[in-house]
Image (cartoon, rainbow, N blue to C red):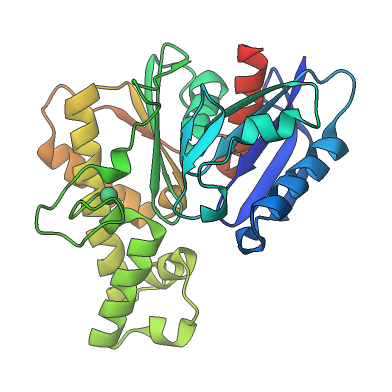
Amino acid sequence: MKAIGIDIGGTEIKAGIVTEKGKILKEIIIETNSYYGKKKLISNLERIIRKLDSKSIKAIGIGFAGDVDSKKGQIVQSPNIQCMNKVFLVKELKKKFRKKIFLQNDATLMTFAEALLGAGKKYKIVVGLTAGTGIGSGIVINKQIYSGRDNLTEIGHTVINFFGPKCSCKNNGCLEQYVGIKALMKITEIRMEMHNSKLKKMWPLTPKKVDTAAKKGDKVAKAILKETGAYLGIGLTNILHFLNPDAIILGGGLSNSNILIKEAKKEMKKRAFKRVKNTKILKPKFKNKAGIVGAGLLALKAH
Ligand SMILES: [Zn+2]
């Protein structure tokens, strides 16, 4: 059996035909361009589905970067794709396609793919964290998505500093304010101005450039990654103490910097209870395709 998996992020829409074994057979990537509005985005989705569709495909899974109501098939709120706020996406697409369509949060689907067939497949309790602009998260227990009462599990918005910067969710000092790509870039800009760093010549900056500079010995870049890693370590410790999972999968930009990950693990070992501190911290097997695979698998399993 095969299904269409679609991963809608703030920057790109990635889609493909996904097999039961998690293989992507055909892939389409387009820019999200959410500033063109809801109608354009939905018509782009329709175009993608038509290109991937065939008689053998009975179901479509969609991951969306934001708060989604899976039961109603509705996007409740999305800070990065605001034109889709309150849209009943499943209903809109069902007007054109006679398929079963499922909607879920994108980070949850990344975790789902990894827990079923990826880095976490040997484990029962798997947590996923993924760094995009902010921090997304998902929980999968015994191969089932744990969605709580409202399909809202947001580890990125757990507070790690009571006096920290204001977050879009109205809290202060959320994990996302310290560890997401946006946060990393903010810290980098401040530090770069304060110190004489090679980073100044590398504008516009990306997390990858900061990591490369650190590897080449740039002290400021290294200090930034270590600091961010330590904050991530606090976040990981909270997850360990709250859920006692078997494994935590770190996706997105988070998993790409070994300096950051090493520091996060060090901080976690320093803080966590002895019996939980050997929890596996893993990189995603499906890398940046985990969202497509998870969306496809959701459609195949729920179908
Ligand atoms: Zn927050």
Instruction: Out of 28 and 289, give the one closest to the viewer.
Output: 28
Q: Is residue 259 visible?
A: yes
Q: Would you place residue 116 above or below residue 74 in this image?
A: above
The total of numbered circles placed on residues is 0
Which residue is located at x 74 percent, y 36 percent? 16
110 in relation to 298, above or below:
below
Horizontal side of residue 227 vs 249, given as left or right: left
On the picture, is 144 further left or further right than 27? left
Q: Is residue 268 above or below residue 148?
A: below
- The quadrant where residue 289 appears: top right
Residue at 57 percent across and 36 percent down: it is: 63
**Residue 221 location in percent, x, y?**
33, 72
Position of residue 196 relative to residue 294, above or below, is below
The residue at 42%/73% (across/down) is 213
Any part of residue 195 in sight? no
| Quarter assignment of residue 283 | top left
Placement of the N terminus among the 4 image quadrants: top right
Locate the C terminus by quadrant.
top right
Q: In the shown orientation, is residue 231 left or right of residue 59?
A: left
Q: Position of residue 71 (x, y in %)?
A: 51, 21
The residue drawn where x is 41% and y is 69% is 210
Residue situated furthest right in the rendering: 55
Side of 15 where 232 appears, left or right = left
Residue 123 percent across, percent down from the top left: 41, 16
Residue 282 coordinates in the image, percent (x, y): 41, 35
